[in-house]
Image: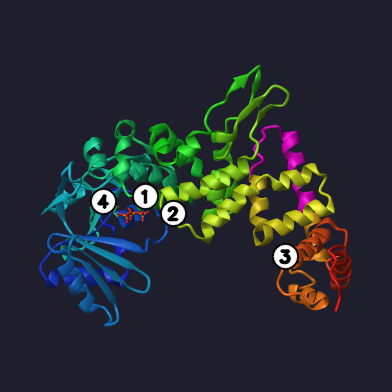
């Protein structure tokens, strides 16, 4: 990885086209940022590509569009001086080189046209400030004024300017530094990290949407704990997700301690990330114990307890999503449900996995039973090998039992074997609460294993229950 020519990075015909368009309108253009970084890291093919030109980004985009099929979509954002072209495979973002400084009070950037160097200066990290030339005379040439290639080799995140300036210009970059460190398995330059610590409070001026985008990316990493540990050390986590930092620490009363639920949580998230890419399941792992901080009590007889933390935690999930302006939709409900049920499979093991406990678990988890089991297995973080093996083998037993019970009883997507209508016709009823009572009695009897999940048995129970309620058959 050296300065030099990287023509082979620009093999896609679209780059030639941009080069041609730039010539047509007599501006210099460069590929910059993530595409260059990822190419040098041999990190797959990046689909979103940033083009900077010394002139108007919008004019260049319009010229490029002329060379592409008529149907190609272009969006221009006059306020920002940017334009975006979407082709089938790529998203091309065009911007004019800028010399930018921020007005600290209004937070509005004061933008002036600039040179390529000016533009590189105001980018976030040395590894994101590298550019490939698109000029015919030095097509593919790497322009790397801050030795980003060296930083790629030594795996370090560093800002081109004094970090206090770079982070202050856009405080989201503090999160981005941590996100890139986590994604690329890099470290953050110590001076930069100190600057993040001292500027952490400025994250408050950033919109929740932008913050959440970075959080998602950290959670999606192979080892999310990398990012979360940095977030914690920098002081950012306390400001963004105080529910997690509240789990930190071990208390001791009368010689009794409990585990540090923060570090435990991070282990659970790393564990689950080896088994799933589902970002919402990973969120559930991250939040599964948040109810433990407010429910923690010490009791002389039993030591530390966290009674009802699952229920409390699921309520907190709603508050947290709302505060961060995350969608309050089925994803949120999924996370809530998993947090609320996060101790259930363990309870089933404690009840020696009786048929009825397993049936209830399958019924209550419904379509999310697999994810719940994955979460609970990831929750096993004991360092005692004997116990570790025992817990996993217990889980396997529950899984085997689940298959057996589900094959026989079909309670996963429970459909009552006797319908409300049948109850109404049998007893000549209009809609009333007795119908609900009978239906609930049938469901309970099936889940308890008192009757099989079959129509005739359920019908017989309906008749008995109706009699008890003083109902007459037609
Ligand atoms: N950039 C910046 N400051 C930001 C965001 C972006 O300086 N707060 C610059 C960087 O040069 C970055 C480029 O804009 O490389 C494009 O940003 P973005 O698309 O967000 O990131 P990528 O580097 O492309 O990486 P990824 O797609 O992984 O987010």
Q: Nearer the viewer, mark 2 or mark 3?
A: 3
Q: Is residue 404 visible?
A: no
Q: Are marks 2 and 3 in contact (CB under 8 Å)?
A: no
**Residue where numbered disc 1 is placed:** 208
Label 2: state its secondary structure.
Answer: loop
Q: Nearer the viewer, mark 1 or mark 3?
A: 3
Which mark sits nearer the N-terminus, 1 or 4?
4
**Residue where numbered disc 3 is placed:** 433
Q: Is residue 292 visible?
A: yes
Any mark on residue 326, and which? 2
Q: Nearer the viewer, mark 2 or mark 4?
A: 2
Which mark sits nearer the N-terminus, 2 or 3?
2
Read off the magenta span.
Answer: 379-400
Cα separation, mark 1 vs mark 3, equals 45 Å
Q: Is mark 4 within 8 Å of ligand 1?
A: no
Please name whichever residue, 357 or 95, is drawn nearer the observer in this view of the structure.
357
């Amino acid at each position: 990885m050296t300065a030099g020519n990287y023509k082979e990075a620009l093999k896609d015909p679209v780059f030639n086209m941009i080069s041609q368009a730039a010539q047509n309108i007599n501006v210099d253009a460069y590929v910059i940022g993530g595409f260059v970084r990822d190419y040098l890291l041999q990190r797959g093919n990046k689909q979103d590509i940033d083009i900077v030109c010394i002139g108007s980004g919008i004019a260049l985009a319009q010229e490029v569009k002329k060379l592409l099929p008529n149907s190609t979509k272009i969006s221009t954002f006059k306020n920002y001086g940017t334009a975006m072209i979407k082709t089938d495979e790529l998203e091309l973002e065009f911007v004019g080189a800028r010399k930018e400084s921020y007005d600290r009070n209004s937070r509005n950037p004061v933008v002036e046209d600039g040179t390529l160097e000016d533009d590189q200066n105001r980018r976030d990290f040395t590894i994101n400030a590298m550019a490939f030339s698109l000029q015919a005379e030095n097509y593919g040439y790497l322009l790397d004024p801050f030795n980003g290639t060296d930083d790629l080799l030594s795996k370090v995140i560093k800002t081109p300017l004094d970090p206090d300036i770079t982070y202050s210009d856009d405080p989201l970059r503090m999160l981005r530094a941590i996100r890139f460190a986590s994604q690329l398995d890099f470290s953050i330059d110590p001076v930069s990290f100190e600057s993040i610590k001292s500027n952490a409070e400025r994250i408050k001026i950033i919109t929740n949407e932008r913050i959440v985008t970075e959080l998602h990316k950290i959670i999606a990493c192979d080892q999310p704990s990398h990012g979360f540990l940095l977030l914690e050390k920098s002081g950012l986590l306390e400001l963004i997700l105080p529910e997690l930092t509240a789990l930190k620490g071990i208390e001791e009363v009368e010689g009794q301690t409990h585990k540090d639920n923060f570090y435990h949580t991070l282990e659970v998230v790393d564990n689950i990330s080896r088994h799933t890419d589902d970002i919402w399941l990973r969120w559930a792992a991250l939040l599964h114990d948040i109810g433990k901080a407010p429910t923690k009590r010490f009791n002389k007889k039993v030591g530390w307890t966290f009674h009802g933390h699952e229920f409390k935690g699921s309520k907190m999930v709603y508050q947290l999503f709302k505060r961060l302006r995350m969608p309050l939709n089925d994803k949120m409900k999924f996370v809530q449900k998993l947090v609320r049920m996060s101790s259930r499979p363990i309870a089933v093991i404690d009840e020696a996995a009786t048929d009825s406990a397993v049936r209830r678990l399958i019924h209550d988890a419904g379509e999310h039973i697999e994810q719940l089991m994955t979460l609970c297995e990831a929750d096993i973080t004991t360092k005692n090998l004997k116990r570790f093996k025992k817990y996993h083998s217990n889980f396997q037993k529950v899984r085997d039992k689940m298959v057996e019970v589900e094959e026989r009883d079909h309670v996963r997507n429970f459909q009552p074997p006797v319908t409300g209508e049948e109850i109404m016709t049998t007893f000549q009823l209009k809609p009333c609460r007795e119908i609900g009572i009978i239906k609930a009695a049938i469901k309970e009897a099936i889940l308890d294993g008192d009757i099989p999940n079959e129509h005739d048995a359920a019908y017989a129970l309906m008749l008995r229950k109706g009699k008890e309620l003083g109902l007459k058959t037609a």
